[in-house]
Amino acid sequence: MTTNQVGEALRANTVARQIIDRVGDKWTLLVISALGDGPLRFSHLKERVEGINQRMLTQTLRGLERDGIVVRSVYPTAPPRVEYGLTAVGGELLDVVTGICSWTRRHLAAIEAARDDYDARAARLARPL
């Protein structure tokens, strides 16, 4: 991909940059992955995405809803039931997220080896002579 193909995303204060910032957020990727099997209630979504707190999940869902990636459905039951699901746009993004997850699995061993090498070099450089 060339700079021309991502030009808007490289410039600050553009809608494209805002979307890239949202999509690149770790919680966004995990929430989209969790919703890949279908709509979930807030509490179930929080259980699926280990480590996310209630405030961060709320903030992430609101941003994704605002961008048309997630839809919030309220059902008139007692008590009211609320579910979050992917829109068509969100489903397309799920394909990208799935690709990132596949890439991660394929390259996990190489990345771990690179980290070990880096950490060993950094430790040697940090030792006093």
Image (tube, helix red, strand yellow):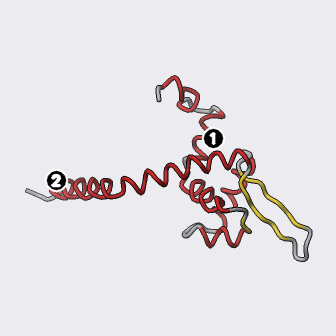
Please determine whether, in this image, residue 46 is positioned above or below residue 107: below
Please determine whether, in this image, residue 50 is positioned above or below residue 125: below
Q: Position of residue 49 (x, y in %)?
A: 58, 67
Of 18 and 106, the residue lying toward us = 106
Q: Position of residue 75 (x, y in %)?
A: 88, 66
Of 14 and 45, the residue lying toward us = 45
Q: Residues within 10 Å of mark 2 (few under 14, many from 20)?
A: few
Asked if residue 9 lies left or right of residue 78, the reply is left
Asked if residue 107 lies left or right of residue 59, the reply is left
Give the numbered dot on residue 46: none
Q: Residues within 10 Å of mark 1 (few under 14, many from 20)?
A: some
Q: Quadrant of residue 42?
A: bottom right
C-alpha separation, residue under disc 1 versus residue under disc 2: 39 Å
| Residue found at x 14% / y 59% | 127
Please determine whether, in this image, residue 118 is positioned above or below residue 39: above
Helix, strand or loop status at disc 1 = helix
Q: Which residue is mark 2?
A: 125
- Which amino acid type corresponds to the residue marked 2 in the rendered image? Leu
- Which amino acid type corresponds to the residue marked 1 in the rendered image? Ile
Question: From the viewer's perspective, is the residue at label 1 or at label 2 nearer?
Answer: 1
Q: Position of residue 73 (x, y in %)?
A: 82, 60
Q: Which residue is mark 1?
A: 19
Work out which quarter of the rendered image holds the C terminus and state it.
bottom left
Asked if residue 51 lies left or right of residue 57, the reply is left
Helix, strand or loop status at disc 2 = helix
